[in-house]
Amino acid sequence: AATLHWPDPQLDFLEDTLYSINSIGFLTENCDPRQNTTIAAQWLRLAYHDMSTHDATDGSGGLDASMIYELDRPQNVGIGMQQSLQDFVFFRTPYVGFADMIAMGVVMGVASCGGPIIPFRGGRVDAKVAGPATVPEPQQDLASHIASFNRQGFTQAEMIALVACGHTLGGVRRDDFPLIVDEKAPDGFGDFDGTAASRTSFDNAVVLEYLNGTTTNPLVASANVTARSDLRIFSSDGNSTMHRLASSNDFSETCKALLEQMINTVPKDVKLTDVIDPLENKVGSALLYTKNGSYVLQTNLRRLSVNPNRTVTLFWKERQTQGSLCPSTGCSVSSTRVSLDPPSFLGELRGIQKLSNYKFTTQIPLNASIAKFWFEVDEKDGSAPSIVDNDDGSGFEIDQDTVLFDPSRTTIVSEGFSGVFVIVVGVKDDILNAGGADAPHLTLESFEPGTQDFIAKIETVSLQRDTTHSPADGYTFFTGNISTGATAMHVHATVGGQKFTQYVVANDFMA
Ligand code: HEM
């Protein structure tokens, strides 16, 4: 399983979104309905269509979010495609692309409808252009379907099962396929399986109804014989795969494996992360800034379990060791407060009841500063306290204190419906002045996810000396405006001939 070597904004975000914060999961939590179908069904179809550009012979294509360039193709008809992309777009970051969110939609959607929990890996890379038009269509013959699934990396038996696993959710809309669903279909929607409860269940009713001849699946039973692609596919091995999937356990296990393969089908040069499981210890962001004559360090440690007796202590090592004020074991402070936060629904399914968040805000003398920090966790159950120090004993390093984003001086200014973040960054005078004739160069690279057209916007603005915040505590302040549509930014600086970079997410703009 993936281990967090802090800072790791990719794993940090993906783990949070899977288990900790009920953000994307909130939309589909109870296999929630939308447009006669379910959000989970829309997400699953989107992921399959996006993946189906894969060519196993040369390793090209796969789950790479190329769908944003392919929406106008007839194979991708249906409001669900656009809507699903809209669901995911807000969650992309400079480190996590659309494709990872489309893949996560399968994990979330399937689990929310009572299906198996599919392991999730991150690291997909978003395509810059459309892929080939290779999504299978209902009017194609069996040989074309077998060839097309082979090209995508699936055998004939796997094709049968994967179609059954996909077509356990949702159905066919008359608006999209008037030649497949006739006008008698209630709400213009032909469910893949017949029972109302089944619509919101990831179950094998689609298999059982097919086998016992009661199916209403339009792709099996449509009056339009050409459109009966599921019938041709399901029966293509004399029903042997379908008989096997009649066991609900087999169905669940098979779907888990095949859907995992589907979301992990990526272009050959893309390397996915290890499987992301909930992390027992997780450090949040660490913000270091100056205020009223000292540094302030703000951070937190998240634990998966609750223990009201547990104490968590933050330790740190000073950057200036001469005339150290800390004992040899490091300076320390107890958590300022603990909050017990609910996990995401997937976190709950993984057995997490509450997440304990130990929060710290501590002052550090200006002449000492901080080089790194770590935590001591005492369960108060007689066992020895444990140390949380980034797994490898290195601790959580504050790599520099020269260029510091300042959340306490940063503000938001509204302008009608939109607005700007007025971002303030402090630069240490020692280094600034040592720069001599070299003028400092500071920029903000803001990231907007592209909620309108699905194309992320990265904008760079220069930071200027701040006229409203006078120099203080050994720092001079610089300021620049970015849109409130930004969800993250990098601060880049060249000061005194050295380069500095800091990554900050919008949550911290107003921390
Ligand atoms: C030969 C292969 C396939 C064909 C011809 C096919 C065809 C279709 C058609 C015509 C629809 C109706 C879409 C609409 O009304 O807008 C549909 C829906 C759907 N398909 Fe497939 N499909 C295939 C394979 C798959 C696979 C492999 C998966 C996923 C593993 C999948 C998942 C879905 C889902 C979840 C829906 C329901 C969408 C909703 O209710 O909004 N399909 N499919």
Image (cartoon, helix red, strand yellow):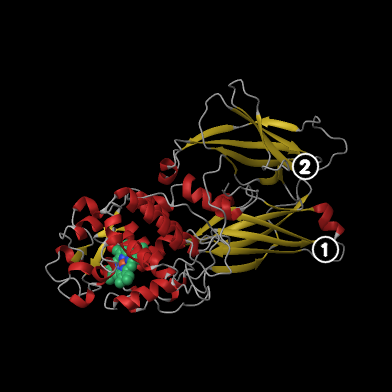
Percent coordinates x, y for residue 49 in the rendering: 39, 69
Question: What label sits on residue 221 in the rendered view?
Answer: none
Residue 272 % position (x, y):
56, 60
Question: What amino acid is at disc 2?
Answer: Ser
Quadrant assignment, res 38: bottom left
Q: Which residue is under mark 1?
A: 497
- Lateral position of residue 246 relative to residue 24, left or right: left
Up-down relation of residue 166 to residue 356 (above or below): below
Residue type (three-letter) at the residue carrying disc 1 = Gly
Residue at image coords 19%, 53%: 196
Q: Give the residue displayed 63% in from the left and 64% down from the top.
A: 445
Asked whether residue 449 appears in the rendered view, the answer is yes
Whether label 1 touches label 2, CB < 8 Å: no
Placement of 308 over or under 186, stated as above or below: above
Q: Quadrant of ligand 1?
A: bottom left
Helix, strand or loop at disc 1? loop
In this rendered view, identify the residue nearer to me: 111 or 479. Answer: 111
Q: Residue at x 52, y 53 (%)?
A: 14
Tell me the element at label 2.
Answer: loop
Question: Would you identify the image quadrant in which residue 80 lies?
Answer: bottom left
